[in-house]
Amino acid sequence: DQQVKQNSPSLSVQEGRISILNCDYTNSMFDYFLWYKKYPAEGPTFLISISSIKDKNEDGRFTVFLNKSAKHLSLHIVPSQPGDSAVYFCAASAWGNDMRFGAGTRLTVKP
Amino acid sequence: EAGVAQSPRYKIIEKRQSVAFWCNPISGHATLYWYQQILGQGPKLLIQFQNNGVVDDSQLPKDRFSAERLKGVDSTLKIQPAKLEDSAVYLCASSRQGVNQPQHFGDGTRLSIL
C-alpha cells in the first residue's frame, strides 16, 4: 500500500527559477513530514521537515508547505541551483514510527 | 560528527547463499533503522530498534531476514537464504531518541543476487 505518493517521477527547471516538488499522502495519522535529497551512490540526506501543527517551514532556499485537509505537501526551492540536481524523497511518519517514503522525484536544474 | 557507517558497500552472492550487513549509527543516537530500497522505489522500513529493543518489525520477512542490536549501538542485518528479489540497496539510519527526530542515513550496501 502506497501511503505516500510522489506522482512526478521527474522535473526539469532552469537555474535561478523555482522548483516545486509535490507529495500526497493517504494516512491521516501521519504527523511528521520530511524531505530527503539523494545523490547517486549515497544515502538520502535530510533536508527539511514539518510537523502537522504547522503549515509552513523555511530553511534558507527551501520551504515546505503542508495542506492537511488536502493531505498534500510540497517543497519549494528558490532559487534553484545546478547542485540541487538530485532525487528528492518525501517521507511521513506517525508518532515517530513506521516512516513511509514516496518513490522519489528526480530534479534536474539546467544551467 | 561522524555519520552512519555501513559495510560492505557492495556485495554479490548467489541465490540461496547467506549475507550479513553491518551498521554503526551516529554516536548518541538511540534509534536505529534498516531499510530496503529496490531500484526505482523509495526506502521501505524493515526494522526499527530503540536502544537494543525492537520497536517495529512488521515489514521484515522473518522467514529469511533477521537483525540484532545486542549492545544498543552497532547492528547487523542478515539474509538467509537470499532470493533474487532481495537485490536492493540496504540502508541503515539512526536518529536521536524522541518523536519528530529526523533520520540520518548511511550510504548503504548494494546487494546483487545472481
Image (cartoon, rainbow, N blue to C red):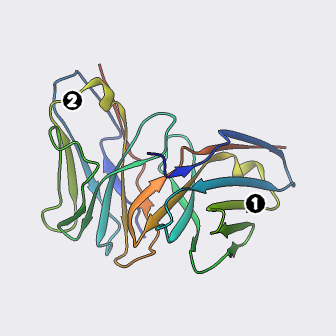
Residue name at image x 12 percent, y 63 percent:
B70
Secondary structure state at the residue bearing disc 1: strand
Q: Quadrant of residue B99?
A: bottom left
Circle 1: residue type: Ile
Crowding at mark 1 (Cα within 10 Å: few <14, some 14-19, many 20+):
many
Find residue B78 and report its horizontal and vertical position in percent. 18, 43
| Image side of residue B92 versus residue A45, left or right | left
Q: Quadrant of residue B49?
A: bottom left
| Image side of residue B42 versus residue A7, left or right | left
Residue nearest the viewer, comparing B89 with B38: B38
Crowding at mark 2 (Cα within 10 Å: few <14, some 14-19, many 20+):
many
Residue name at image x 75 percent, y 67 percent:
A61
Give the quarter of the figure containing the N terminus of chain A.
Answer: top left
Residue nearest the viewer, comparing A6 with A11: A6
Q: Estimate the spatial distance between the alpha carbons at disc 2 and disc 1, rounded to whole Å.
A: 41 Å
Residue name at image x 48 percent, y 45 percent:
B42
Secondary structure state at the residue bearing disc 2: loop
| Image side of residue B53 versus residue A62, left or right | left
Please tell me the numbered disc located at residue A49. none
Residue name at image x 49 percent, y 52 percent:
A3
Find residue A68 and report its horizontal and vertical position in percent. 62, 69
Please tell me the numbered disc located at residue B82. 2
Find residue A92 and report its horizontal and vertical position in percent. 50, 62
Q: Chain of mark 1?
A: A
Give the quarter of the figure containing the C terminus of chain A.
Answer: top right
Please tell me the numbered disc located at residue A77. 1
Residue nearest the viewer, comparing A23 with A86: A23
Circle 2: residue type: Ala
In the displayed structure, would residue B82 be above or below residue A2?
Answer: above
Q: Do badges 2 and 1 share one subunit?
A: no
Q: Chain of mark 2?
A: B
Find residue B103 and report its horizontal and vertical position in percent. 43, 64
